[in-house]
Amino acid sequence: MNGQRLPHVDNVKTALVAWVIGGHALLGYTAVGGWPYDEVNETTFVPGVEVALVALIGPSGLFIIGGFFFLAGLFTPRSLEKKGLGRFIADRTLRLGLPWAASAFLVWPLTMWVAYRVAGHDESVLEVVTQRYPLLDSGSLWFTFVLLIFSVAYAVWRTAAPADPDAAAPGTGQLVALAAGIALASFLIRLVFPAKSGQIFDLHLWQWPQCAAMFALGVACARHGWAREVPDRLRRRSAQVAITTICLVPILAIAAGVTDLAADIGPFLGGWRWQAAATALLEGVLVVSGSLWLLSLAQRHLTQQGRFARACSRAAFPAFVIQGPILVLAAVALRPLAAPAEVKAPLVLAIALVGSFWLSWRLVARAEPARERRHAG
């Protein structure tokens, strides 16, 4: 890696951020929930539409977050090597920790207070901060806080125990073992922290096995140049496994008798149930194969960047940071509209997607001249 930006990586990050914003927009109108606007939503999808959406989009949701951590891991070793321990931790704290703290302690409580007030609740801001579940929720920015924890832990460990430069790249056997480990660890941790459960700071502990494992995989693959090119043999196998599994998920859900997610999803979230074990297994397989497939797909087909794509890639991380308030405020603004969720959700999706990226691009464009002057000085 020579420090140059990789257009395909920027493009896939943009796509992942757009997917997350779109997914949150839809989840806010589901009966099963998964995005905080569901606490106050005025309408929900009819059960059949909700099941169809999950069948089409749900399987990818099993590996998108792990894909983010995998990409982060790919670029963490070089950043640590370049900056050193102290500067690396300071930089990550500023970039990841500051947005999380601002969201958890100020922006997100105020956003949810507005949503509650518009929905007719009379909670004060203090009550929203102290009584909402989970305590000190930060919206979508739990991701940045967890990534900060993993990054600092890796930096301290790697500084104390330097990497073996002759370590071999992961092969098929190691990737299969990783998927199995993620599945087992996910099943076990969900005996205590079921999927969709909340913890203080909304740490998503039930997702930590895939997050930690994929971050570690990215770190292990970094020195072997996987950010530029996933080995061809693994690319083909990961694509076959990911596509097959994605097609199987809705079939297995139908075979299990899922017709109404809000009523039927409980056994899949955790506990000594075959449904929870099957979910963990599918997640382990998909997060490994899907992340590699997605990156290799970008390496083959998303290698070019025009002006619009470059602007979107520069705005992607800020868009991820500010998406929460924009999503909720868009939903609040559309609340008086006498329309079903099937109409409102796509409108919120479009408003939030355009608004998050446009506002972020404007902020980045304003900040870049000042950054260039500092570097020149």
Image: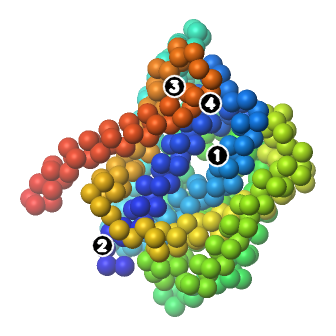
Residue at image mark 3: 331
Observer-nearest of 33 and 157: 33
Q: CA distance from mark 4 to mark 1?
A: 28 Å
Residue type highlighted by circle 1:
His
Q: Residues within 10 Å of mark 1 (few under 14, many from 20)?
A: some
Q: Which mark is residue 342?
A: 4
Q: Extreme left residue here?
A: 377
The residue tagged 2 is: 4
Do the numbered discs 3 and 1 sit on residues whose CB atoms are within 8 Å? no
* Lower sequence index among marks 3 and 4: 3
Q: Is residue 275 above or below residue 8?
A: above
**Gap between marks 1 and 2, in whole Å?**
33 Å
Q: Residues within 10 Å of mark 2 (few under 14, many from 20)?
A: few
Q: From the viewer's perspective, is 213 left or right of 336?
A: right
* Amino acid residing under circle 2: Gln
Residue 91 place in picture, x, y as percent: 35, 56
Q: Disc 3 to disc 4, how far (Cα)?
A: 13 Å
Q: Nearer the viewer, residue 96 or 340?
A: 340
